[in-house]
Amino acid sequence: MARFEHLEAWRACHRLTIAVYEAAKLLPEYERYGLSQQMRRDTVSVCANIAEGSAKRGPAEYRRFLDIANGSMTELRCLLLLARDLRMLSDETWISVETVRRPAGYLLWRLLRSMDR
Protein backbone atom coordinates (compact mmCIF):
# COMPACT_ATOMS: atom_id res chain seq x y z
CA MET A 1 0.00 0.00 0.00
CA ALA A 2 1.05 3.60 -0.61
CA ARG A 3 2.20 5.73 2.29
CA PHE A 4 -0.85 7.61 3.48
CA GLU A 5 0.89 10.98 3.16
CA HIS A 6 1.12 10.39 -0.59
CA LEU A 7 -2.62 9.84 -0.98
CA GLU A 8 -4.43 12.82 -2.44
CA ALA A 9 -7.53 11.86 -0.42
CA TRP A 10 -5.59 11.92 2.85
CA ARG A 11 -4.00 15.29 2.03
CA ALA A 12 -7.43 16.77 1.26
CA CYS A 13 -8.87 15.34 4.49
CA HIS A 14 -5.90 16.73 6.42
CA ARG A 15 -6.70 20.20 5.04
CA LEU A 16 -10.31 19.63 6.06
CA THR A 17 -9.24 18.77 9.60
CA ILE A 18 -7.41 22.07 9.88
CA ALA A 19 -10.43 23.96 8.49
CA VAL A 20 -12.80 22.23 10.93
CA TYR A 21 -10.56 22.98 13.90
CA GLU A 22 -10.49 26.64 12.89
CA ALA A 23 -14.28 26.75 12.42
CA ALA A 24 -14.90 24.93 15.71
CA LYS A 25 -13.15 27.79 17.54
CA LEU A 26 -15.99 30.04 16.36
CA LEU A 27 -18.78 27.96 17.89
CA PRO A 28 -20.35 29.22 21.11
CA GLU A 29 -18.49 28.32 24.30
CA TYR A 30 -21.45 26.23 25.48
CA GLU A 31 -20.84 23.90 22.51
CA ARG A 32 -17.24 23.24 23.53
CA TYR A 33 -18.12 19.67 24.59
CA GLY A 34 -20.98 19.22 22.15
CA LEU A 35 -20.92 19.96 18.44
CA SER A 36 -17.42 21.41 18.50
CA GLN A 37 -15.85 18.33 20.05
CA GLN A 38 -17.81 15.90 17.86
CA MET A 39 -16.90 17.78 14.67
CA ARG A 40 -13.22 17.65 15.61
CA ARG A 41 -13.44 13.93 16.47
CA ASP A 42 -15.13 13.15 13.15
CA THR A 43 -12.59 14.96 11.04
CA VAL A 44 -9.66 13.40 12.92
CA SER A 45 -11.32 10.01 12.49
CA VAL A 46 -11.43 10.48 8.73
CA CYS A 47 -7.69 11.18 8.47
CA ALA A 48 -6.70 8.58 11.02
CA ASN A 49 -8.74 5.81 9.40
CA ILE A 50 -7.29 6.51 5.96
CA ALA A 51 -3.81 6.37 7.49
CA GLU A 52 -4.45 3.27 9.60
CA GLY A 53 -6.16 1.43 6.76
CA SER A 54 -3.21 2.07 4.46
CA ALA A 55 -1.00 0.16 6.90
CA LYS A 56 -3.18 -2.95 6.95
CA ARG A 57 -2.22 -6.16 5.21
CA GLY A 58 -4.83 -6.42 2.53
CA PRO A 59 -7.46 -4.58 0.55
CA ALA A 60 -10.41 -5.97 2.53
CA GLU A 61 -9.07 -4.52 5.77
CA TYR A 62 -8.13 -1.25 4.07
CA ARG A 63 -11.64 -0.95 2.63
CA ARG A 64 -13.14 -1.48 6.09
CA PHE A 65 -11.15 1.48 7.43
CA LEU A 66 -12.17 3.58 4.43
CA ASP A 67 -15.80 2.69 5.15
CA ILE A 68 -15.35 3.99 8.69
CA ALA A 69 -13.70 7.17 7.36
CA ASN A 70 -16.61 7.66 4.96
CA GLY A 71 -19.10 7.28 7.81
CA SER A 72 -17.24 9.90 9.83
CA MET A 73 -17.20 12.22 6.81
CA THR A 74 -20.97 11.87 6.48
CA GLU A 75 -21.47 12.53 10.18
CA LEU A 76 -19.27 15.61 9.90
CA ARG A 77 -21.39 16.91 7.03
CA CYS A 78 -24.51 16.46 9.15
CA LEU A 79 -22.98 18.34 12.10
CA LEU A 80 -21.75 21.20 9.91
CA LEU A 81 -25.25 21.60 8.46
CA LEU A 82 -26.72 21.56 11.96
CA ALA A 83 -24.25 24.20 13.19
CA ARG A 84 -25.09 26.36 10.18
CA ASP A 85 -28.84 25.93 10.52
CA LEU A 86 -28.69 26.73 14.25
CA ARG A 87 -26.72 29.85 13.29
CA MET A 88 -23.72 28.73 15.33
CA LEU A 89 -21.61 29.05 12.18
CA SER A 90 -21.96 32.00 9.89
CA ASP A 91 -22.80 31.31 6.26
CA GLU A 92 -19.34 32.58 5.35
CA THR A 93 -17.59 30.14 7.70
CA TRP A 94 -19.81 27.26 6.62
CA ILE A 95 -19.08 27.96 2.94
CA SER A 96 -15.34 28.11 3.60
CA VAL A 97 -15.40 24.74 5.37
CA GLU A 98 -17.78 23.22 2.82
CA THR A 99 -15.43 24.35 0.04
CA VAL A 100 -12.78 22.10 1.61
CA ARG A 101 -15.10 19.30 2.76
CA ARG A 102 -16.78 18.66 -0.56
CA PRO A 103 -13.62 17.80 -2.57
CA ALA A 104 -12.17 15.89 0.40
CA GLY A 105 -15.34 13.79 0.58
CA TYR A 106 -15.24 13.19 -3.15
CA LEU A 107 -11.61 12.04 -3.06
CA LEU A 108 -12.34 9.77 -0.11
CA TRP A 109 -15.30 8.30 -2.00
CA ARG A 110 -13.13 7.72 -5.08
CA LEU A 111 -10.49 5.99 -2.96
CA LEU A 112 -13.15 3.82 -1.38
CA ARG A 113 -14.64 2.92 -4.77
CA SER A 114 -11.18 2.09 -6.14
CA MET A 115 -11.02 -0.70 -3.56
CA ASP A 116 -13.98 -2.38 -5.26
CA ARG A 117 -11.92 -3.05 -8.37
Image (tube, rainbow, N blue to C red):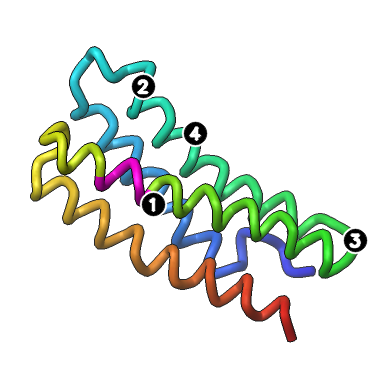
Image position of 85 (left or right of 50): left
Cβ–Cβ under 8 Å for marks 1 and 3: no
Residue named by callout 3: 57
Rendered image quadrant of residue 66 = bottom right
Residue named by callout 1: 16
- Label the magenta part by its dominant secondary structure: helix
Kindly identify the residue that appears in the image at 83 percent across and 66 percent down: 60
- Which label sits in the foreground, 3 or 2? 2
- Which label sits in the foreground, 2 or 4? 2
Instruction: Point out the stretch of residues depicted in magenta.
Output: 77-81
Image position of 74 (left or right of 25): right
What type is the residue that disc 2 sits on?
Gly
Residue at mark 2 to residue at mark 4: CA–CA distance = 11 Å
Residue named by callout 4: 41
Kindly identify the residue that appears in the image at 37 percent across and 69 percent down: 103
* The stretch drawn in magenta includes residue 109: no
Rendered image quadrant of residue 35 = top left
Cβ–Cβ under 8 Å for marks 1 and 2: no
What type is the residue that disc 4 sits on?
Arg
Circle 3 packing at 10 Å, graded few (<14), some (14-19), many (20+), is few
Say what secondary structure mark 1 lies in. helix
Residue at mark 4 to residue at mark 3: CA–CA distance = 26 Å
